[in-house]
Image: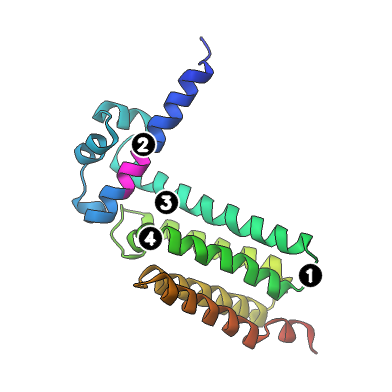
Amino acid sequence: MARKSSWEWSRTAQTRKSMLQAAREVFSEHGFAESNVAEVVARAGSSVGSLYHHFGGKTELFLALYEDHQAAHEQASAASVAKARKSGVDDPVELLIAGARAYLDGVWERRDLVRLFIDGDGPPGFELLRRTRGREWVRQNAVLLGAGGDALARFTVAVLTSIIGEAAREVATSDTEEEAREVIEAAMKLIRRLDPLKDFTDD
């Protein structure tokens, strides 16, 4: 089988990017249930056949949009934590805050997508996917904090993750960036005030 040229790969990537951008606009305006692929491909300047070739259908397009959104969050948070470590930060709580701040910055930047994904209007199975991703998020935060496996540690990490998650909802629905920044700073202060590592280390 002939290998694709770099030009063909570039064209394929651009087609996918255009479709995802069009899907972002259409889904954000109408929700998943009321959106149709015809409008997506019209905005992307493509064809229904091309959409099905790249994604398989409306559900797969929605899920691809979600996965790209989550990947952007994870990359930004990981980069922020790595940058903090490189600058000499070794307090796990401050590292958590560095990652959370990057995550919430991304929430503001992509607030249309966050509102889309939290409003409950998604394809069958999407809520289960979100819950599964949420559990993985708690697990990653537990690793970052060096939390033990006991019930108190698990509960504390879950609470901290919930604070970040609820802050995301507020940021996504904020009317102005100033309001969003106030929510972000309030969340960071609350995480510091809880001093979660105290219960992990004190006997």
As shown in the figure, which amino acid type bears the numbered disc 3? Tyr
Residue under numbered circle 4: 127
Q: Residue at x 55, y 73 (%)?
A: 161
Q: CA distance from mark 2 to mark 1?
A: 41 Å
State yes or no: discs 4 and 2 in contact (Cβ < 8 Å): no
Could you tell me what secondary structure mostly forms the magenta stretch? helix
- As drawn, is 143 to the left or to the right of 105? right
Secondary structure of the residue carrying tag 1 is loop
Residue located at (44% from left, 59% from top): 109
Magenta segment includes 23 = yes
Q: Residue at label 3?
A: 66
Distance of mark 4 from mark 3, alpha carbons? 12 Å
Q: Residues within 10 Å of mark 1 (few under 14, many from 20)?
A: few
Of 53 and 29, nearer the camera is: 29
The residue that mark 2 highlights is 18
| Image location (x, y in percent) of residue 48 | 24, 30
The quadrant in which residue 160 appears is: bottom right
Q: Which residue is mark 1?
A: 90
